[in-house]
């Protein structure tokens, strides 16, 4: 007898960027998981396009209640109510289906794969085993790939021993540094769940002894002060936090240290660089993957 999996319903709206937060809040009331993605009309990934908002529920949603909530938010915000689509998804093993969507990823010398792709990495490659899960960073996002490519470039220029993965998510970038340089890595995240996942992934990748994961809101944890100065800092977060943290980054960076900054769109590069140039840091290299920029800066 074939296995039976829970029924799942998908709610969907297509909205302009300015109304996304308001309607996202409505979906969070009726769905157990909410996500969104963009159709870019501008050609420069600046958010000027239609956003598809989706919610997923294991209980049958009540259309009338959702439409009423959408209408109330729209009226209060002066927005139009977009058409709501509700569909029941096929009864399948979504975990297996999801894993099929994550084939191994090549990023320079790094070979990123999930546990559903067993076996040794290709000869001469550095294998990173990270499953898609509760923490950001399974290798498929352009910012993660950009950071891995930047680290690969740095790896060809000599060994680094003291490294920081700020906003580590799954820990993939910290693990990459620990494996490439046999470096001592501090990995931090504001989310305790992410820190737990990062520690587990470090163990699965054989670098638990070299990577310490702690919960930290930005640069506040005592371990950051104790372990400074860092020779390499990777911060794959968002543009505005990058700008806000620039003074702390400069204060914790070794004289010959470099920082890999990502989580920013191309149009945000000038803002991020201006914040770091004010701290005496200059651009060493940049790369763009699918509209997302990764900047390497140093003194």
Image: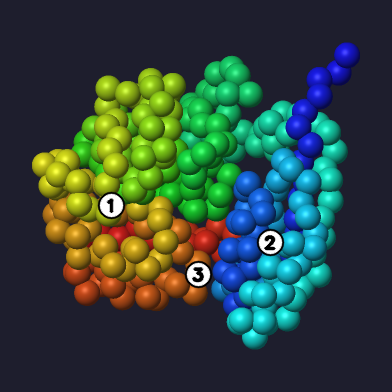
N-terminal of the pair, mark 1 or mark 2, is 2
Q: Secondary structure at mark 1?
A: loop
Disc 3 is placed on an element classified as: helix
Q: Tell me the element at label 2.
A: strand
Distance of label 1 from label 2 (alpha carbons): 29 Å
Residue topped by disc 2: 53
Q: How many marks can you see?
A: 3
Cα separation, mark 3 vs mark 1, equals 26 Å
First in sequence, mark 3 or 2: give its number: 2
Residue 229 versus residue 97 in the image, above or below: below
User: Counting other residues with Cα less than 10 Å from the Cα at mark 1, is it few (<14), some (14-19), or many (20 or more)?
Assistant: few
Q: Which residue is mark 3?
A: 266
Location of residue 44 in the rendering, given as x and y in whole percent from the top left corner: 60, 73
Label of residue 217 in the image: 1
Instruction: Tell me which label, 3 or 1, sits earlier in the chain.
Output: 1
The quarter holding residue 105 reads top right
Mark 3 or mark 1, which is nearer to you?
1
Between marks 3 and 2 in the image, the one whose residue lies nearer the viewer: 2
User: Residue drawn 84% across and 45% down?
Assistant: 88
Q: Residue 83, how many percent across, how many down?
A: 81, 70
Q: Residue furthest bottom?
A: 78
Q: Quadrant of the C terminus?
A: bottom left
Depth check: give the residue in front, 108 or 66.
66
* Image x and y of residue 17, in percent: 62, 74
């Amino acid at each position: 007898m074939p296995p039976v999996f829970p029924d799942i319903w998908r709610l969907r709206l297509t909205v302009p960027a300015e109304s996304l937060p308001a309607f996202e809040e409505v979906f969070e009331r009726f769905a157990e998981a909410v996500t969104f993605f963009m159709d870019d009309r501008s050609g420069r990934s600046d958010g000027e396009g239609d956003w598809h908002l989706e919610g997923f529920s294991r209980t049958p949603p009540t259309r009338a209640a959702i439409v009423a909530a959408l209408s109330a938010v729209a009226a209060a915000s002066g927005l139009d109510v977009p058409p709501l689509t509700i569909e029941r998804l096929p009864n399948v093993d979504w975990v297996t289906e999801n894993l099929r969507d994550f084939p191994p990823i090549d990023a320079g010398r790094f070979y990123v794969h999930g546990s559903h792709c067993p076996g040794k990495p290709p000869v001469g490659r550095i294998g990173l085993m990270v499953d898609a899960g509760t923490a950001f960073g399974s290798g498929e996002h352009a910012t993660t790939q950009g950071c891995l490519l930047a680290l690969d470039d740095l790896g060809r220029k000599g060994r680094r021993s003291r490294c920081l993965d700020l906003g580590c998510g799954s820990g993939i970038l910290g693990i990459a540094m620990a494996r490439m340089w046999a470096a001592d890595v501090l990995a931090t995240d504001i989310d305790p769940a992410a820190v737990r996942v990062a520690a587990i992934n470090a163990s699965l990748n054989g670098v638990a002894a070299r990577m310490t994961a702690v919960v930290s809101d930005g640069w506040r944890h005592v371990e950051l002060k104790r372990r400074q100065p860092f020779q390499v800092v990777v911060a794959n977060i968002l543009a505005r936090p990058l700008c806000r943290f620039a003074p702390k980054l400069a204060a914790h960076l070794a004289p010959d240290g470099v920082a890999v900054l990502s989580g920013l769109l191309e149009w945000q590069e000038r803002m991020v660089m201006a914040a770091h140039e004010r701290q005496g840091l200059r651009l060493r290299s940049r790369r763009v993957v699918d509209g997302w920029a990764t900047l390497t800066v140093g003194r």
